Image: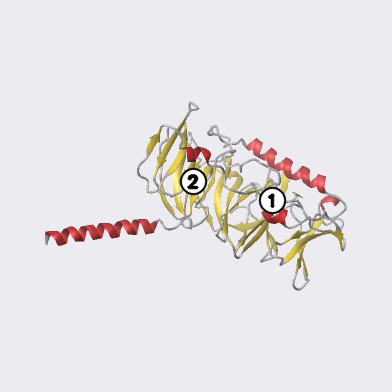
Amino acid sequence: MLVQSIVSRVVFAGVFALTAAVSRGDSEIVIAIRYLQPKGTSHSHLCLYREDGKLLRQLTNDNSGQDIDPIFARDGETIVFTRENPNDTREFWSIDPRGAKLKKLDSAPDWYAATKDSPYFTRGGEKEAPSSSPTPPQEESPSAATPESAEQGEHQSATALDAVANAEERPPETIKAPDHSGEIFWRKGKEGEGPEEVLNWVMWFRDSKSDQETQIGRLRGFPSFEPLEIRGNKDPQPSLREPSDVDGQRESVGERERANQFLFEGPLRLTFFSCHLDSTNGTTVEAFDFNKRKLIRLSPNYATPIPLPGEAAFLTLTENRYVQIPGSSKTANCSYVERWGANIKERCYDEAEFPYHEAEHPYCGGEPEVRYARKGSAAICYGVSMYRPGKTPAVISIRNGAD
């Protein structure tokens, strides 16, 4: 009987361990997030979510500093992060995803120090990392945070100036879908119905099979007619031919160098454009959905698309300006991590539902499947890392600030 009891306990323990391992089969995402409060200094802590948005647990709760830049190890069994203290010193810590084995490290592991941002969409030629941490106006932020004024200048100058510089009497370049399903092209808008004449180009889509042409509409504000590109593709292959005029349109300069302008993953088929709105709202990002053949705005302000290779989904590091801090009349510029699927739904909000500063009401835009934050919160993201068992790459990470 004693032997049988011991065997039973061993079998039970083995089944329990196996169950625990299986329960971590889903992708998990750890975020350094700082929930702003009306008084005092708020702190950034690590929170672990399942990919579908379920909060699994808060991993850290120390208020002696700001926890930033969490990164999963390749096997997903360890998370290393940085703690920034008020005296401008940095400490390196590790913890496991179950919230155990919190340990202060003598130095940053080599793999942690060497980890760069995963690929993300940005303006062509930009090398800056996506800004994850605008400064809340009423509080100090970690030293690695990017000032909001710097963000506004970056997005504004890159988009508005390029738009004017590229605004010629000839249409912007045709954009051919990588699966040869069709192409985006441009026609001059009617006089008086759009922005200033040099920017008055209307987007159209031509279906390759039927040759049917569909009017899509105008990009907002001062747009960049060139799609965003995935950072990391700095040296595209040279085109085999030069641009030429075909049927009144400027022909695409080649397909190979444009491959990094698209997010095609199964049923997910998108390209992204940045549009400068004004000095208050900054720059926004619109996605063109090749399935629905329409433009979908990802945020009232900026949103950085982050591909998830092997998944018909993507993340965004999303800016929301002038978010009211709960329990206060104060507002702050916030940032969140969101997940989007292939079927992007849209929603229109009235001013009460969407109280951010916006020239137009109601605000209509895409609705993410998941926002990894408390509902109705004013929060700032200071780095994110996602562990994806069985997928390549297994870890997707975006640090706080530049590489």
Q: Residues within 10 Å of mark 2 (few under 14, many from 20)?
A: many
Q: Whole-percent x and y of residue 390?
A: 47, 58
The correct choice, above or below, for 79 with respect to 108 in the image is below
Can you name the residue that lies furthest to the top here? 87
Quadrant that contains the N terminus: bottom left
Q: Is residue 365 left or right of residue 252?
A: left
Q: How far apart are the two marked residues, 2 and 1, measured between alpha carbons?
A: 25 Å
Per the image, the residue denoted by label 2 is: 31
The circle drawn on residue 228 is: 1
Nearer the observer, 49 or 195: 49
Q: In this view, does 147 lie to the left or right of 184?
A: left
Q: Describe the element under mark 2 as helix, strand or loop.
A: strand
Q: Is residue 403 left or right of residue 78?
A: right
Nearer the observer, 214 or 192: 214
Q: Residues within 10 Å of mark 1 (few under 14, many from 20)?
A: many
Q: Describe the element under mark 1 as helix, strand or loop.
A: loop
Q: How is the image coloured?
A: secondary structure
Mark yes or no: residue 286 visible: no
Nearer the observer, 349 or 144: 144
- Disc 2 marks a residue whose amino acid type is Ile
When asked about the image quadrant of residue 297, the answer is bottom right
Mark yes or no: residue 160 visible: yes
Q: Whole-percent x and y of residue 318?
A: 59, 48
> Which residue is pictured at 41% across the width and 40% down the height?
94
The correct choice, above or below, for 400 with respect to 389 in the image is above
